[in-house]
Image (cartoon, rainbow, N blue to C red):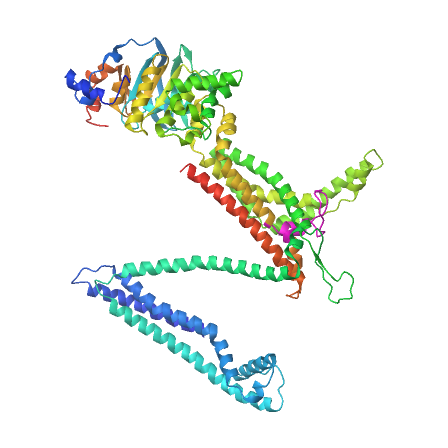
Amino acid sequence: MRFNLFRQLDGAESGGTAATSPLLAPPHAAHQEPTGPIKIQTRDVSVFYGDKQALFDVSVDIPDKAVTAFIGPSGCGKSSFLRCLNRMNDTIPIARVKGSIRMDGEDIYDKALDPVLLRARVGMVFQKPNPFPKSIFENVAYGPRIHGLTENKTELADRVEQSLKRAGLWAEVADRLDAAATGLSGGQQQRLVIARAIAVEPEVILMDEPCSALDPIATAKIEELMDELREEYCLVIVTHSMAQAARVSQRTAFFHMGELVEFDDTETIFQNPRDKRTLDYITGRFG
Amino acid sequence: MLLIYLLVLAVFSTAVFVLARRAARRRATVVKAHSAAGYHGAWALIWAAVPALIILILASTFDARIERTVLIASAPEAVQALDAPRRAAFIEDARIVGAGGMPRQIWTGDLSTALQEEAARASRVDGALAWGGLIAAILAALIGAGLAWRQTRPEFRARNRVEAFVSVALFACSAVAILTTIGIVASLVFESLRFFQTVPITEFLFGTQWSPQIAIRADQVGSTGAFGAVPLFVGTFLIMVIAMLVAGPIGLFSAIYLAEYAGPKRRAVIKPVLEILAGVPTVVYGFFAALTVGPSFRAFFNWIGAQLVGGPLDGLGQHLLLVQNQMALVAGAVMGIMLIPFVSSLSDDIINAVPQSLRDGSYAMGATRSETIKRVVLPAALPGIAGAFLLAVSRAIGETMIVTMAAGLAARTTLNPLDTVTTVTVQIVTLLTGDQEFDSAKTLAAFGLGLTLFVVTLILNFAAQRIVQTYREQYD
């Protein structure tokens, strides 16, 4: 295990840097690994729910092959912004999105672009594990089936196996693929949902507070998984836990009252934030 | 009279309530009271009103019976010598005369003089009973109020007592419904047992001849009835299947539309309209079936028959020419229309209960709306929808009015939807309407049918509720 919950505490004790809290210890070597090229570029993105504006002119460059974390107090717009990136806001009738979001230079809000195809490229994992009421196998096979990604049963079974292996769940469920997915534990369900997202080979995986419904051990496993997935995907996570952002992300964006306050390397955000609001938030003065 | 007593009792117990409440307030000035003054008042009110009320009700229910028993027990020899029905008639006349009325029969000799004496006695007994009941009620009210008054002390836990009483009263109300059900079932079972003594249960359940008309005189033709209910079961089943073929798909699809496609505005219009459809009395559907749908279906099939006669399908044509207004198809189709709102409303609730997170999960995988509905929402809602369908089936086989008016009376074992068939409910109606002797096999057959119907719908409802319940638990 490359990460665990306690490692940050150890780091804080031995490092003794300017961190303001042991949980916000200095990032270790993993954080200094170079990130990939820009994957998603947003310019002046605003989100409205009816007459109410939830997000104001957000411009960020999200790198590939890295974990980007969105942090901020509840209702700050970070989840709304995340849901723009795969156009999930389209499913809310009163939601409206302004501004430009480009993935690999392509405008994802282009009228000609089918949001259904976009979502096959941008997977999403939700706060509460939401396995379909089907078998474990059928859950993972869902995406490949609806997108017709495999030619025959053997290929499908292979893909399911690969996805479960990459999500670190294969060893636990290999002998009961036909069992109901709802019978798994919360942490297993969340990894199953990640396997389900991986199975369609997306380029980006969005995670909306993926660990908030899980216990610390399950959380540690998911975080470990994120760190592995980072090598192949562009990961964007929304999290309430600053410690989690510090542990797993390379880039961090801090949102407050619907505005993007600061977006920088995770190390900078947690050790040397430019904005006072960021400093107040990470030191626990509000939020 | 009783009304006046009740009014007096109401005034009295209200006064007790007010007084006890005031007393509770006054007595609680030194020590802090356990219960609010209102509870002390309510407790006193319960004690003043409930025992007196029970006595009044018992007295007015049983006074005639007690009076009769007393009169018979002490009647003179001449009356005692009469046979039971005549004696009862005599006592009844004595009571009528005692109350100042005219006797219904002419009594002669000893009985004529006895009648006057008995009438006087009846009047005395009646008065005594009435006064006795009233005095007992007044005493009960006073004693109850007095007891409660003495309990009006600050430390008395009036609130707990009142709440216990309320919960008992509420339980009694729900028990009424349950006891009534048990009573109905018991009467069904006992009358059915009497029926099965005349007609063996195997013959009833598996016999294929149904002609329950038993002649009054033994020498009449067809003097024995036949009680094989299979044609009725088949008819009921046939109409139920037709009704579900109409209501199932239309109801389910309209539920899917309402739950997944309709915007809030359209939903706000369509759902109430569908529910109004559920409020149309079934007799209205019945004459819609009998007067509109039946004749037009008949005209349609007769026309097709006329085209076919003489051609290669001559046999079919001849058959279609004979189609009548009343047929299984008409009853089933109209019943299906009646069930649409039932199915769609239940299914809509169930589809709405599928968590949004499942839909989000599917959309986030790049699934379209129809893929999401087909592969995620409907499979998740399937158990609940099955439950809804079972409830609809149970209503279909219990439905009476539409089939009475549109299905016909001929007990035939057929699966041809164009034939007239008859159902269990229709036969119960025909067996029990009009003047009937209550102990012939013909009337008792209705109870046998009723019991069968009851058992089948009970099983269906039970299964449906279990299914829907486990489904609900899954997503709570």
Position of B72 relative to B23 (above/below):
below
**Which residue is pictured at 59% across the width and 80% down the height?**
B84
- Residue A61 lies, in percent from the top left, at 33, 13
Along the line of sight, the residue nearer the viewer: B52 or A285: B52
The residue most toward the front is: A175
Asked if residue B413 lies in the magenta stretch, the reply is yes
Figure label count: 0
- Residue B469 lies, in percent from the top left, at 45, 42
Q: Looking at the rendering, which quadrant does residue B35 occupy?
A: bottom left
Quadrant (top left/top right/bottom left/bottom right) for the C terminus of chain B:
top left
Quadrant (top left/top right/bottom left/bottom right) for the N terminus of chain B:
bottom left
| Residue B38 visible in the snapshot | no
Along the line of sight, the residue nearer the viewer: B193 or B303: B193
Position of B308 relative to A46 (above/below):
below
Asked if residue A29 lies in the magenta stretch, the reply is no
**Which residue is pictured at 49% across the width and 41% down the height?**
B467
Chief SS of the magenta region: loop
Along the line of sight, the residue nearer the viewer: A38 or B243: B243
| Residue B230 visible in the snapshot | yes
- Residue A219 lies, in percent from the top left, at 30, 25
- Residue B388 lies, in percent from the top left, at 52, 41
Which residues are drawn in magenta?
Answer: B398-425
Does residue A157 appear to the left or right of B135 in the view shown? right
**Which residue is pictured at 60% across the width and 84% down the height?**
B82
